[in-house]
Image: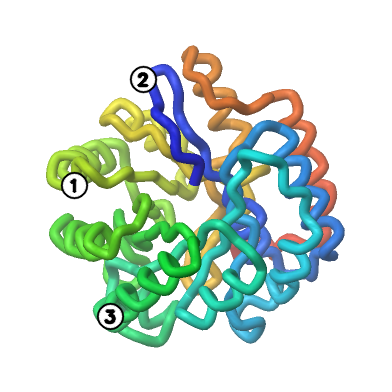
Amino acid sequence: MVREELSSKSISIVEVGPRDGFQNVRKEIPTGDKVKIIDLLSAAGLRSIEATSFTHPKWIPQLKDAAEVIRRITKPPGVVFSALIPNEKGLDRAIENGLEEVVFVVSASEALNRENFNKSTWESLAELSSIAEKARRNGVQLRGAIAASFGCPFEGSVSVERVIEVAEAFRNAGVSAVTLADTTGMAHPLQVKELLSVLLSQLSDLPIALHFHDTRRIGLVNVYSAWQAGAKIFESSIAGLGGCPYAPGAPGNVATESLVYMFHKMGVETGVNLDRLVECSQITQELVSDRRPDQGQG
């Protein structure tokens, strides 16, 4: 993640489309097309891009070419490319491929964590210290992400206390930031404000990012609520691609171009060229239009 002081008139964007977006596209996307889109994203001014995931191809076959994607993308100075890792083996692959940053995901919901990783939340957190230590030794920055921060498709409500417990575990491991992920788009603006206010108060030394899905078309409303509560880091996906393969009802993410448009209209700097971003969105939609899941499968 790009690390810089952000004023109240600027925010930082983490582009997750090449990972969170592509992983939910059913038909295989050629590696060259993935590389093209990532290069267009960095050329548009995005400085933090989640490029892929080092997950076993059995679970996410769309990202089986992770190493080749990382090898082939253009790496402009100042752009941080990251990959999601499910375990220490994923970290090893990220290190082998020269990545600066990895993202380790743990769900605040036991049921979703078992569905995703076949282990409990606390079993995942038990791996955190060794992953964090190995990342430090190899000069790789570690970010944490808390899935189902605003609710779970299996369990329903997720308590604020559980989210705080997972966030504290990440902080104690020395992560650079923690993302609160609205995995299936269950959040509403008041809930966002309340949860974020608690976390910013109790974990004031920990940078917090927000990751919203647009299930009920209030993703941007939730972004705005989080921004008003003090958030300055947001994850989004080009063309609104995305969804969790293991979370029923998880549609696309908040579209990066919509996010940038909204903040620019409010006079908030993003560092992104909106015209180039819109062009990238159009190209992305064309490249994946015949490969997206059937309606209702997202």
Does residue 210 appear left or right of residue 140 in this picture? left
Residue 111 % position (x, y):
32, 78
Mark 3: amino acid: Ala
Precedes in sequence: disc 3 or disc 2: 2
Mark 1: amino acid: Leu
Q: Nearer the viewer, residue 130 or 154?
A: 130
Residue 213 % position (x, y):
48, 49
- What residue is drawn where x is 30% and y is 26%? 228
Q: Is residue 166 above or below residue 89?
A: above
- What residue is drawn where x is 42% and y is 17%? 9
Mark 3 residue element: helix
Residue 27 % position (x, y):
78, 69
Circle 3 residue: 126
Q: Tell me whether the residue at label 3 lies in contact with that at label 2, contact meaning CB atoms closer than 8 angstroms.
A: no
- What residue is drawn where x is 63% and y is 51%? 17
Mark 1 residue element: loop
Q: CA distance from mark 2 to mark 1?
A: 19 Å
Mark 2: amino acid: Ser
Circle 2 residue: 8
